[in-house]
Image (cartoon, grey):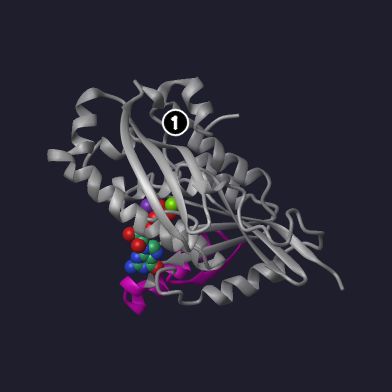
Amino acid sequence: MTHKAGFVNIIGNPNVGKSTLMNALVGEKLSIITSKAQTTRHRILGIVNGEDYQIVFSDTPGIIKPAYELQESMMDFVKSAFEDADVLIYMVEVGETVLKDEAFFNKIIQSKIPVILLLNKIDKSSQEEVEAKIEYWKKKVPNSFVYVISALEKFNVDTVFYKIIELLPDAPPFYPKDQLTDKPERFFVNEKIREKILQHYKKEIPYSVEVETESFVEEDNIIKIRSVIMVERDTQKGIIIGHKGSAIKRVGTEARKDLQQFFDKKVFLDLYVKINKNWRSNDRQLKRFGYKD
Ligand code: GDP
Ligand code: K
Ligand code: MG
């Protein structure tokens, strides 16, 4: 029996539904999803294992013009996803046009490896609009296999899955066959807390936040977690905490509920806030948080 395996890397503009698709393909909530751009900051692997195949999906940050060091690191994750892909998934949504970043777009249309172009969010559009857009994309990216999907409603996701298997090269598995991701448990704790912050705070606050889990202790019936929410400035600390601690309490309650589902175990979550001045532009801090080698 031959075995197929490869890296299938999902790239595209912010907010088109990349993380929603990766979770749908993997069948686990590995990536956090919000309506805000730059929700995904890392390259996150989601591994799907079959008897005779292994697909290593990569979810990546949306392509932007970097304005500070953290965003430069985010675009480095996207670049790395171009370099090691066996299959590229270029995701667009109905209504958008080609990538503003010409260098990335040229990499896609000149790609020697197979490109699957997914036109997502078709649940929001009329049939006429979708048909016109299929034509548009077939012309813009002639080297691609084009599919229309709804990642949210899981429409056509299985069709895409089978196409991916067809395109995978013959290769032995890259990871142990029971492995689901490359990230440790603490990473998913940090991300879940950040998801709640993205959902509940406005403007620059979510972008100034980094979360670090200082302690993760799994006992028989409970996981005890202590995490710190880091902000860049003193005023942001007060906003995160909120009146009499009400705002941070909501973050903690919602994150804990989701984490209990994720780990399938009771969770105790202790949250506190610290100032880490200008961490987004500090090389040493970016390394500490896993944005740089
Ligand atoms: P990413 O930034 O590309 O990773 O996009 P996300 O997966 O975080 O999704 C961004 C927003 O689009 C979220 O509010 C999702 O719920 C929404 N979304 C994703 N896929 C679909 C879809 O197929 N249909 C609709 N209507 N919304 C979607
Ligand atoms: K998003
Ligand atoms: Mg994302």
The picture places residue 98, in percent across and down from the top left corner, at: 44, 52
Above or below residue 166? Residue 40 is above
**Front in this rendered view, residue 110 or 125:** 125
* Magenta part of the chain: 123-150
Q: Quadrant of the C terminus?
A: top right
The picture places residue 59, in percent across and down from the top left corner, at: 53, 52
* Mark 1 sits near ligand 3, with its Cβ under 8 Å away: no
The picture places residue 247, in percent across and down from the top left corner, at: 20, 44
Residue extending farthest to the right is: 1
Q: On the image, numbered disc 1 is attached to which residue?
A: 70
Residue 257, quarter of picture: bottom left
Residue 166, quarter of picture: bottom right
Could you tell me the amino acid type at mark 1?
Answer: Leu
**Front in this rendered view, residue 264 or 23:** 264
Q: Circle 1: is it few (<14), some (14-19), or many (20+) Cα within 10 Å?
A: many
Above or below residue 189? Residue 280 is above
User: Would you say residue 31 is visible in this rendering?
Assistant: yes
The residue sitting at 18% across, 40% down in the picture is 245
Q: Quadrant of the N terminus?
A: bottom right
Residue 88 is left or right of residue 168, and the answer is left
Above or below residue 225? Residue 125 is below
Residue 212 is left or right of residue 196, and the answer is right
